[in-house]
Image (cartoon, helix red, strand yellow):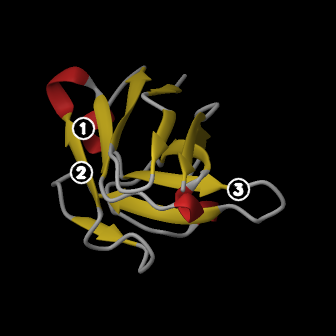
Amino acid sequence: QVNLVESGGGSVQAGGSLTLSCVQSGYTFRDRGMGWFRQAPGKEREAVASIDSDGRSMYADSVKGRFSVSRDNAKNTLYLQMNNLKPEDTAMYYCAARDFRGATLASWNYEYWGQGTQATVSS
């Protein structure tokens, strides 16, 4: 059983920063590719970032240069550092885990999902 719990969301002004965390309970966090996704009201879920088991990362074009994904395998924790936030970053942010080591921005490749944490950016 793999459970994912996100935290760290909140409300900030444009230009501000937030750091999201995702703790995985269960086994073999270090062997999993992990991802962050988001969904704004009335919009489809979209990929934000992904990181493979060796720490190599990839990003959606909309967040490149502003967001950074990382992982701490000793703590079974995934992070998303979000800088220079914009109102269009307002969304529910979800952590996801897959049964493979590689990173991918394709949501259908993830088997496990958290409940989400809300990030709201005001102008």
Q: Residue furthest front?
A: 123
Q: Bin the neighbour count of mark 2 within 10 Å (Cα to Cα): few under 14, some 14-19, many 20 and up.
A: some
Real-space Cα separation, disc 3 to disc 1, in angstroms? 30 Å
Q: Residue at x 40, y 61 (%)?
A: 49
Q: What secondary structure is found at the residue carrying circle 2?
A: loop
64 versus 74 height, above or below: below
Query: Is residue 109 visible to the viewer in this orientation of the structure?
Result: no
Q: Earlier in the sequence, mark 2 or mark 1?
A: 1
How many marks can you see?
A: 3
Which is in the foreground here, disc 3 or disc 2? 3
Residue 53: give its label.
Answer: 2
Q: What secondary structure is found at the residue carrying circle 1?
A: helix
Real-space Cα separation, disc 2 to disc 1, in angstroms? 6 Å
Which is in the foreground here, disc 3 or disc 1? 3
Q: Earlier in the sequence, mark 3 or mark 1?
A: 1
**In which image quadrant can residue 71 be found?**
top left
Q: Bin the neighbour count of mark 3 within 10 Å (Cα to Cα): few under 14, some 14-19, many 20 and up.
A: some
In the rendered view, does 3 fall on the left or right side of 115? left
The three-letter code of the residue at mark 2 reads Ser
The three-letter code of the residue at mark 3 reads Ala
Q: What secondary structure is found at the residue carrying circle 3?
A: loop
Q: Residue at x 41, y 80 (%)?
A: 61
Tell which of 32 and 34 is nearer to you.
34
**Residue assigned mark 3:** 40
**In which image quadrant can residue 93 be found?**
top right
Q: Residue furthest bottom?
A: 61
**Residue assigned mark 1:** 30
